[in-house]
Image (tube, grey):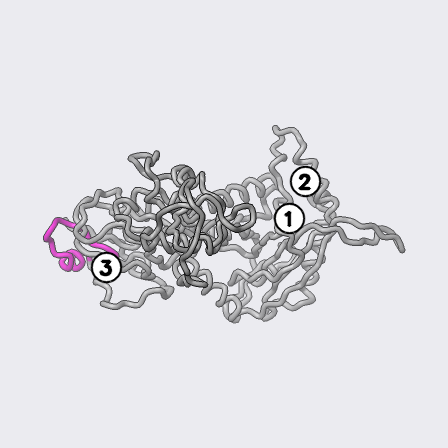
Amino acid sequence: MAHVLIMPRQGNTVESCIIGEWKVKEGDAVAADLPVCVVETDKATFEVPAGAAGTVLKILREAGDDVPVLEPIMVLGEAGESWEAALNAAGKQAPAAGAESGKLSGGGSSDAVQAGSGGGTGSISGSILQTGGLTESFVSAVSPRARKFAEREAADLSAVSSPSGPGGRIIESDVAASIAGRPPLTEAAKAELRRRITAGEASGSITAGSGIGGRIRAEDLKETGFSGEGPGAGPAAGFAGPEYSDAPVKGIRRLIAAQMMESHSNTAAFTLNASAPALNLLGLRSRFKSSDPELGLNKITINDLILFAVSRILPLYPYMNAHRLGDTLRSFRTVHLGVAVSTPRGLMVPVIRNAETLSLLQISAKARELAGACRSGSVSPDDLHGSTLTVTNLGNTGIESFTPVINIPEVAILGICSILPRPAETSPGSYEILPHVGLSLTIDHAVVDGAPAAEFLKAFAAAIKDIDLWLAK
């Protein structure tokens, strides 16, 4: 009996997914648990299993298509069986030829036909290296982490001679071992290597480059066909490569770009900068770090203390804990705190729900759990939706102030900057140099005026100054 595979719903808030890569082709025989494609939302990437054993009769959507959830993407059955009849029997229609891709779609059909094993395997991959002449079976035998690592480091997957993963699968440590002996490369050199790997041109080797510390530069790769795998022989010379490379903005990056543009287009963004005395903040962090491990406090970070302060101050200013929905301002009684997390795939914003009810330890544990899930690729799409205000922290990068982009439909985003020494009045006419943490608050001036926003920022700065007192409340 034919089986219609539909685009699974990855969480309650996801309305469409982009097909990043097909792992099978028409005519292939597949097992029920075999991943047949990789799909992307604006937050995560998932492998989708076939859901039934059989022959791939028809692939209905191409890689790069943005497909509404619950829409058919592939038909399986017995060899020679009519895929059109299977679609008709399932009450589905094939997408029109030349159907547009790359546009965000809403809704989709509400009658679910068999969708793999209930909406994806939960196995999440990063961006995938296009490997040129490698066979599809070889590419499918590479773990998502290994692909991501290979793309980042410009490593040739075909140079891995002894995969050590289950079933002969290439894993990240195999790729790392394949490039362990090569000299460091500049980013331009890595870009040139990626181009050559994709085109199947990489070969040869080089022992050292002309850059600082023997670093290999793009110019060193001229006419060598250098692949960069392991130690080699001979200096570089000769190939006149392009002065630049073009890469399409697609997939997750395109969706993120669209969201950023939508935020700028639909909000009257206005940023206020301030600073807060951080002496107590640093003192508490130091005491927590050196405390008895049984207390569970030594993992609490500066950012955890900041999130705690936000969760206590925000309910006092409901116009900041709000969404702008057209001409309506919806203020929330509960604080669903968005925490910006940098990951290899880009920025993610998991949500600490009901943060105002959580203790410092609970906020710290939840923030650590969500950040780890984002970086490992196991985060649930439902954990990436519904924040009422977002906190983004660039404090460890040396940034003194910046303009965070509002995570619409929120009306504000709070940026945390570096802790730097600043003069402060300790008594009338007396000043000292004390540590201060920089604060950058971007608001949607269409619904929040500057003075009320400044009142919130002032209250938050005061809470940071007296964070020990707030912890005692």
> What stretch of residues is rendered in magenta?
73-90
How far apart are labels 2 and 3 at the CA level? 55 Å
Residue 381 placement (x, y as % from top left):
42, 51
Is residue 461 on the magenta stretch? no
Q: Residue at x 23, y 67 (%)?
A: 96
Q: Residue at x 65, y 59 (%)?
A: 401
Is residue 343 shown to the viewer in this render?
no
In the image, 245 versus 56, the foreground residue is 245
How far apart are labels 1 and 3 at the CA level? 48 Å
- Residue that label 1 marks: 306
Left or right for 268, reference 92: right
Left or right for 225, reference 78: right
Left or right for 158, reference 230: left
Q: Are marks 2 and 3 in contact (CB under 8 Å)?
A: no
In the image, 137 versus 383, the foreground residue is 137
Quadrant hosting residue 205: top left
Q: Are marks 2 and 1 in contact (CB under 8 Å)?
A: no
- Residue that label 3 marks: 60
